[in-house]
Image (cartoon, rainbow, N blue to C red):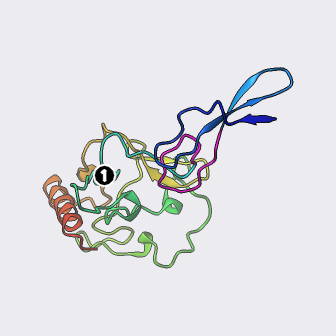
Amino acid sequence: MLHTAASPCRGCRTCGSVSVVASSASNDTVIRHHPVTHPLTPHPTNQFWRPEPLGGPMQCAICLYRAPHGVAGHSSRCCPLGKTECRHQLHEENPFYLAGPCVNVGCVHNQRCLRCHSIGHTMYTLKLTATRWRVTMDGRAVPVTGHLQPPLNASDFMCPLATDSLVRRVVADVHERANSGAD
C-alpha cells in the first residue's frame, strides 16, 4: 500500500490525526484513519471514547433518580433499592427462576422483614416482574431501561404491608441521600 501525505482529509481537531488515502494496484482508493488511543479524544476510530448521553446525566433504572448538574448520583448497580427476591425460591415456570439451592447465607430469603415480621424478604425487597426486570443472555436479572418506566409503587415490593405512600417516602429518601452525596 502506498500512503500519500498530499491527500489527507481534515482529521481530528483534538488530536490532529488525519486520514490518509491509500492506493492499491487496482487504483482503488481506500480511506484509513490513524488510530487514537487517548480515551477522551473524540475520534471515529477511538474505541474508548463515548459521547455524552442525549438525555443528559444517567438515570437509575430502578428508582428513576436523575442527578442534577454537579451531583454524582447513582446508577442501578449501586441503587439502595436494588435488592430483589431470591431467584432460587421462585416457581419453576417463572422466567427469573434459577435451578438449584441458594448457597448465599446472607440472601434475602433468610432475612426477616421488620414491617410484617415474615421471613423471606426485607421491607425494601423488590419483586422480579417482567415489566421492570429482564434476563440477560448470561442469565443475570437486570432492570429494564427506558424513558416510559413508571415510578415504583407498592406492587413492586415483596412486603404485603407496603403502601404507595410508604414507597413514595422511601424513594424520596433515596433521592435525597443521592443529592446529598451520602452512601
The kind of residue on which mark 1 rests is: Asp
Q: What residue range appears in magenta?
A: 33-46
Report whether 132 appears left or right of 49: left
Label 1: element kind: helix
- Image height check: is 159 above or below 54? below
Residue at 25%, 56% in the rendered image: 67
Residue 152 image point, x, y percent: 26, 50
Query: Magenta span: helix, strand or loop, mainly?
Result: loop
Quadrant occupied by the N terminus: top right
In the image, residue 144 above or below residue 140: above
Which residue is at the front of the view, 57 or 61?
Answer: 57
Residue furthest to the front in view is 6
**Residue 112 higher or lower than 61, as above or below:** below
- Residue under the image location 30 percent in, 57 percent down: 157
Picture residue at 37% right of the left edge, 44% below the top: 53
Mark 1 Cα shell of 10 Å, populated few (<14), some (14-19), many (≥20): many
Residue 141 placement (x, y as % from top left): 49, 54
Q: Residue at x 23, y 60 (%)?
A: 70
Circle 1 is placed at which residue position?
Answer: 156
